[in-house]
Image (cartoon, rainbow, N blue to C red):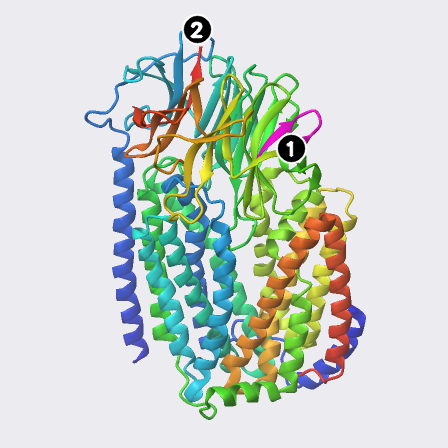
Amino acid sequence: MYLADRRSSATATAEAAPGHGPGRSAVRAVSATVLALGTVSLITDISSEMVTAVLPLYLVAGLGVSPLGFGLLDGIYNGVGALVKLSAGVVADRGGGRHKAVALVGYGLSALCKPLLLVAGSVAALGAVLAVDRTGKGLRTAPRDALISLSSEPEHRGRAFGVHRAMDTAGALLGPLLAFVLLRATQGQLLVVGGDRAGYRAVFAVSGCVAAVGVVVLLLFVPGRSSGGAAGGRPAVTRALWRLAGLRRLTVCAVLLGLTTVSDSFVYLLIQRQLDLPAQYFPLLPLGTAAGFLLLAVPFGLLADKVGRRGLFLAGHGALLTGYGLLLGAGGGGWVPFAVLALHGTFYAATDGVLAAAAADVIPEAHRGAGLALVGTGQTAARFVCSLGFGAAWTAWGPHSALAAAAGALALAAVLVAVLLRTERPA
Amino acid sequence: MSRTARLTVLLVTLLLLGGVATVSVLHAADRAGRRDVAQQGGPTVAPGAVSLRPGARTVVFRSTAWGPHRDELAAVPADRPQAERTASGVKCERFYAAAGTGICLRADPGAVQDGYRAVVMDAQLHDLKSFPLAGIPSRSRVSPSGHLAAWTVFTSGDNYGSLNFSTRTSIVDTRDWHLEENLETFAVLKDGQRYQAQDINVWGVTFADDTTFYATVASAGQTWLVRGDLGARTLTTLHSNVECPSLSPDGTRVAYKHRITGAANDVPWLLYVLDLRTGVETPTAESRSVDDQAVWADDHTLVYALPGDYGSDLWTVPADGSGAARELLGAALAPAYLG
């Protein structure tokens, strides 16, 4: 699959990069708007991840409640987020580009939630605040990606998304660090069961201030787009999007692969169980994935511009499949968890921003926001369905067989996608 | 707006928000400092030796009263809970003890984030052996003989950027240090059938003897009381809607958290007692939500923690559903009755 993909990418490189100078640095070639959006994402992710990192501690220690069952709400929020994302994309395209305005509302809504955490004293109130926060996240994603694609030259979109995703992930890694430094500075011990909430309140207050800085940077340094395509009503948008054969095909591919992409939490559980990893390393596993994503996002963005975004997107799923294979066939060995996490990070770096760049290739400017939202929502929904299916398979057959089934399905989906993408010249 | 104007606005914003952030951190740090000073009217605490050895009947617990001995294990005579507290100098997040063996779930201050350990202690509160923990300490228990110790932690972070929680429960044999690290590897038997699911969680062990224990198993949004067998490595479901069981000293009843469906999120659990022979459930007179694994002070009396002004307070209520709840010890949690 990987070889077939490389053959089709070679022609793409010849076509897509005639005047491509090798000496230009990645950052210099990225537009000021992309850097500004990357900065906004970095700042916002510091703010949101510092809250996410201490929330379990806050629930157990600060509010004195068990966090079990709280996770149930999480699935509902993600569902709400997907619906919001799609409508935000459509609204943002109206009148030739209200992307900045819609993104601003999204970032602003999430920033407002941070001070609200200070007054939310019960699990129910906390749940409501987090739901609004998710809504903000759903609102901002598609218009933000539309702005990134619109402010980059088509041949450098992969790099632009790579730089943005790297900055975003850096923020996600810095957030928890800042939160724990603050907790350390404000109280001797992190865990005072049912105890004083002052330290957590400081974390929420600082998080709110950081989020507000993100909104201000967006307001000041990201230009709004006044030019752009014609205004269109909602039915026109839907019809126009459906007529785009390229977008249709890419969405189908993203959904097919999404249906066989086992969710992160299952991957970490599988690493821990299949490889019998000592329990205390469990919380560190997501950091491994994030570090891989951070390191590889920019190089893979550059690579995507050279060898073709669709090919790399497919190859990224090849990395995931290799990871599944290692988990299935591993007979121990200390290097295996590292290899699986590296492959998991590689998968994200080769697919997350790369899919957005590939989608932008086939969506006209006037419908960029809605089109990106369609691909993203399709992928998210498919992964959610995969989670449910994988959980059921685990229950029925046990983890090893469930993973084997997922790996088989992923291989099949990859072959189908390779055929689907080959019927059309890559952009 | 010109570039200079934009940079000026950004600078002013940074200064303003930076000021707000700094003030909130300083305010929190100041509060933290004041917690090291004893409160007026609080319990009197004096340093001294605390022993887990059988002798005069005492309660050993974590004292959360403000002052220099905050969060240390402390002891008071069981019949005079308001007496001066003897503080041991040993700090634990969660604690339990029986027959001269203590289990202490302890935070290890790290450079950035705390790590946690389960420490098995001898009767003089000296560390015997410790085990790294995968998450936030929640429950701990010791078998009546002092041979087995169990603990539960909350793990999170298995979903990057999300809020999913699960529990992990371990049991160690202090005679040969054999560790069952994760009770989820035991076979769950429900209605005579092997029950398998990816979302099984086990928590809240309470020991009958050195083979048999009771615990909570949760899956698919439901909870069950299970009887565990360490030799057979099985967990057999006995009763539904039971969390954090606590076996009475005579082994006939289990006190537990009963989830009230349809109630407001703020009042999810009531303290009930289940008779293991008859299956009859009795609500206790405590009407507030109890999120704790209760402790039996004797065959008729339950003790449990509720949130209070200084962390949490210990309350007591009769196990047979009669009487009323009354406060036992302020600024205290994780009690163990010894002697």
Question: Depth check: A340 or B224 in front?
Answer: B224
Whether pointer 2 and pointer 1 mark residues with C-beta atoms closer than 8 Å, the reply is no
Comparing B306 with B112, the one in front is: B306
The mark closer to the camera, 2 or 1, is: 1
Residue A247, above or below A404: below
Image quarter in which the C terminus of chain A is found = bottom right
Residue A393 horizontal/vertical position (percent): 70, 54
Residue at the farthest bottom position: A230
Amino acid at the residue labelled 2: Gly
Q: Is residue B24 left or right of residue A31?
A: left
Q: Is residue A12 left or right of residue B270?
A: right
Residue at (70%, 60%) from the top-left corner? Answer: A320
The image's mark for residue B127 is none
The three-letter amino acid code for the residue at tag 1 is Leu
Question: How packed is label 1: few (under 14 Cα within 10 Å), some, or many (20 or more)?
Answer: many
Q: CA distance from mark 2 to mark 1?
A: 35 Å
Q: Secondary structure at mark 2?
A: loop
**Residue underneath mark 2:** B55
Residue drawn where x is 76% and y is 80% of the image? A422
Q: Is label 2 on the same chain as label 1? A: yes
Residue at far top of view:
B55
The quadrant holding residue A198 is top left
Q: Which residue is mark 1?
A: B235
* Dot 1: element: strand
| Residue A37 seen in this snapshot | yes
The reply to whether residue A339 is visible in this rendering is no
Specify the segment rendered in magenta. Answer: B225-234
